[in-house]
Amino acid sequence: MGLFDIFRKREEATENTTTEQNNETPSDLLLKSLLRGEQLTKDKALSIPAISSAVDRLSNAIAMLPIKLYKYETKENEDGKKEIKVVEVFDDVRTKILNHETGDTLDPFQLKKSIVKDYLTDKGSYIYIEKQFNDFVSLRYVNPDNVSFAKNFDPIFKDAKYLINGRSYETYNFLTILRNTQDGTEGKSAVDEISSSIETAFTTILYELGLVKKGGGKKGFLTATKKLGKEEIKALKEAWSKYYGNGTNEDNVIILNDGLEFKEGANSSVELQMNERKKTLKDDIKDVFHIYDDYDTTIKDGVIPIISAIEHALNKNFLLEKEKGIYYFAFDTKKITRGSLKERYEAYKIASETGWMSKNEIRYAEDYDAIDGLDVVSLNLANVLYDIKTGQYYTPNTGSVMDMSKGTGGDNNESGN
C-alpha cells in the first residue's frame, strides 16, 4: 500500500464519520443525551405536549393582564384626622412601558409571556431596566442562557453581580423573577422538579415516533430452518431496510420465503402500559404547574403566585427609592377573576343591593361609560348605619341620629323633615 493510498483511506474514514454525524436526526441526538444521563434542557421539556400546554396556559393568562401604578395619598378630614386613600396614577411613563411600548423588540404581551416561561422552565427571568439618571426608558428582555453570576461566599451577607457578554451588572439594574430561589440570583424551575418523569416521557415520545416512522412495525428477528447464502441474506437485508425506511407504500411489504419466520423482539405499546405512564406523567405535570380542572383553583394556586412574584420585582427595582412605600405596582386581574357573564352579573346584583358598589362602579368594572345620576348606592331603610369615625348611629327610616360618645340620640331631625 502506497503513501497516497494511506492518506486516501484516512480521508474516506473522516468523510464517512462526518456524514454519519450530519445524518443524525435531532431525535437520535436527544435520545443519546438521555441515555448518557445528561440533564434535560428546557427545549426538550417543552417538546412534551403536557408541559408546553401548561406553560402556555399560565403565560397567556398573565400576559394579557395590564399592570397599573397606584399611590397612597394622605389627607386630613374636617376633624383633623388623617385619611389614607389609594389612587391610580395615569401619567407615568412606566405604565406606558409595561402596557404599550417596552422599548425592546418584544411588545408588552410577549415580554410578560417570556417572563412567565423563563420563570417556570429556566433558572429565572432577567429583564434589564434602561434608565437615564432617574428617568426610566425601557425594559429589555435577556435570555437566561446569556446570564451568569459572580457570587460571594458569605452565607449570611449574600451579594452577587450578573455577567452578560463579559460585562458586569448590578442586580438592581434588572427585574429578577425567580422560582424557589435560595440566593436571590437563580431559581429552580418546575422542569427540574419533574426531570425524572419528563425523561421517561420524552423517551416514550421518541419510541412512539420510531413506531410511526416504521409504519407501526414491531422490532424482532428472523429465523430460518435452513442455511441462507450470501446473496439471499443481502437481498433479505435490502428488503427489510426498505420496509423500515421512509419509502413508498409498496416498499412496506415483505414476503417471507419458505423456511423463514418472524418473531417479535419487543413488547407492544399496550404491553408496555404506555398510556398509563403518559396519564401519570400528565397528572404529575399538572400538579407541579398547579393546573386543575377547577378554574378558580388554577388561578389561585397557579397564576396569582407568579403575578405576586412579578409585582414584588417591579416594586423593588422599578421604583425610585423615594417612591417606595408610597407607590406600588399591581396587576389588574379583572379579566381572569371575574368569572362568566352570568356569575359576574349575579355578583353585581348582590353588590348593588347591599350597597357595596354603585351602578357606575359596576359599569366601570365592565368597561362601560358612567351615566349621570348612577353614582348612588342602595340602602335598606330598615338597617341602622354606624359611622366608625364619628361614633354616630343613623336610622334612615326615622332620620334619627344617636351619638354614642355623648350618650344622646334623636337630637337631629328626629321628625324626618
Image (tube, rainbow, N blue to C red):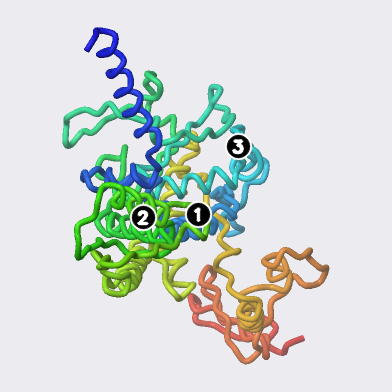
Residue under label 3: 102
Please tell me which of labels 3 and 1 falls first in the chain: 1
Determine the residue positioned at 67% across, 90% down. Answer: 398
Q: What is the three-letter code of the residue carrying label 3?
A: Thr
Instruction: In the rendered structure, find residue 240 and report the number of the disc placed on it.
Output: 2
Which residue is the extreme one toward the right? Answer: 372
Label 2: few (<14), some or many (≥20) within 10 Å?
some
Q: Position of residue 77 (x, y in %)?
A: 59, 57
Residue type for callout 2:
Trp
Foreground: 237 or 26?
Answer: 237
Closer to us: 388 or 259: 259
Which of marks 2 and 1 precedes in the sequence? Answer: 1
From what the image shows, is residue 301 above or below residue 126?
below
Q: What element carries label 1?
A: helix
Dot 3 lies on which element? Answer: loop
Left or right: 322 in relation to 122 = right
Which of discs 1 and 2 lies nearer the camera? The answer is 2
Q: What element carries label 2?
A: helix
Q: Which mark is residue 59?
A: 1
Q: Is residue 84 visible?
A: no
